[in-house]
Image: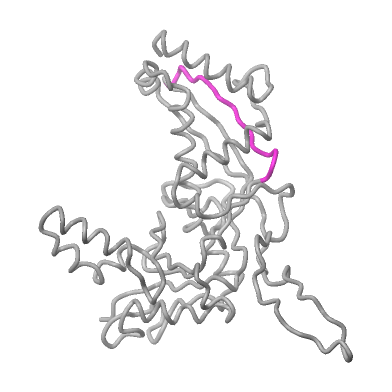
Amino acid sequence: MRKETRVAFTGYMSQIALLNAVANAAEKFNVEPSVQQKLETAIQESDAFLKRINIIGVNEKDGEAIMLGVGSTIAGRTNTSANPRSPRDVSKTTKDVYNCKKTDFDTAVPYALLDAWAKFPDFQSRLSGSIVQRQALDRIMIGFNGTSVATDTDRAANPMLEDVNIGWLQKLRTSAPERVMAEGAVAGKVTIGAGGDYKTLDGLVYDAVQLLDPWHRKRPDLVVLVDRNLLHTKFLANVEGASDNENELAAAQIIAKARLGGLPIEDAPFFIDGAIMVTTLANLSIYYQLEARRRHIKDEPERDRIADYQSSNEAYVIEDLGLCALVENIEEAA
């Protein structure tokens, strides 16, 4: 680490210690609640997809999903001369529960990169921003691919972080299997095309909407999250026909404004292959336990790097299971 880098890094450490009211950021500490909230806001705002879902702080490590809105119908009428009015308990419209699991977000930054950043006046924000962005992307990856919680995670065997936490899709598979379509006429697959279960991807999405509770099927905020590869055939002609800049822009606009089964397409990072999901983005949440984020920043000269050890207790939640449908194992008909 160069001299000017050491000065910049020391200032960074001092600022973190000051913000968290600790003597030394190089010793493990609990992140201050106000700093934790700012960090969570930064993580959410670093990615367009995370901005559109919920990231919520909860006091308890375990509990029932927090309904952010009323998830079912409440309008009605009662003949009070015969029966008393009976308000609908909207808390019973969701069956999901959460269990925040400790997740490590440990990052190593080599001296060479710190040296490159040290000459910039925004050194501290560059360093913290790079860590924040990676945490954001990892959260999305876990949300769509997580299937288990391993005591000792294996990045080589689970490159999409499948063993870090239980994500939204796995929650639906286990808690509401009636909302999941995983096969059609052929075992283990749902086929599209001539002779398949559905002639078009639009038809499949239209049918998937029927897996939602009846009162959700015509909501104006429904979207379809889709594997990009499934869109290949549908939009290939538009893309291949783009021979100049004007046509390329037109093709991009066609895809951006495209719909499937009448629903707008949501391009969700790291969404699983061969699948579509119908829901609202407000129905997807990440919970983190308040006052449970730990941090320890360590200079590791023996490896020519600094290491930022962070951990947070987190859970992935579908607020209303009746507002979610998943179709997976989608393939083109033979």
Residue at 66% across / 57% down in the picture?
98
Image coloring type: one colour
Question: Looking at the picture, does residue 2 appear above or below residue 328?
Answer: above
Query: Which x, y percent locates residue 102?
Result: 62, 45
* Residue 174 lies in the magenta stretch: no
Q: Please report the bounds of the magenta region as a residue range.
A: 289-303
Residue 92 percent across, percent down from the top left: 72, 71
Outermost residue, top direction?
A: 3
Residue in the picture at 65% in, 31% down: 31
Q: Determine which quarter of the picture holds residue 237.
A: bottom left
Q: Is residue 234 above or below residue 296?
A: below
Considering depth in this image, is 241 or 274 the residue closer to the camera? 241
Above or below: residue 93 compared with residue 3: below
Image spot of residue 51 (x, y percent): 50, 50
Left or right side of 29 for 7: left
Residue at image location 58% in from the left, 19% down from the top: 15
- Quadrant occupied by the C terminus: bottom left
Q: Residue furthest left?
A: 243
Residue plotted at (52% across, 29% down): 308
Q: Quick one: quadrant of the N terminus?
A: top left
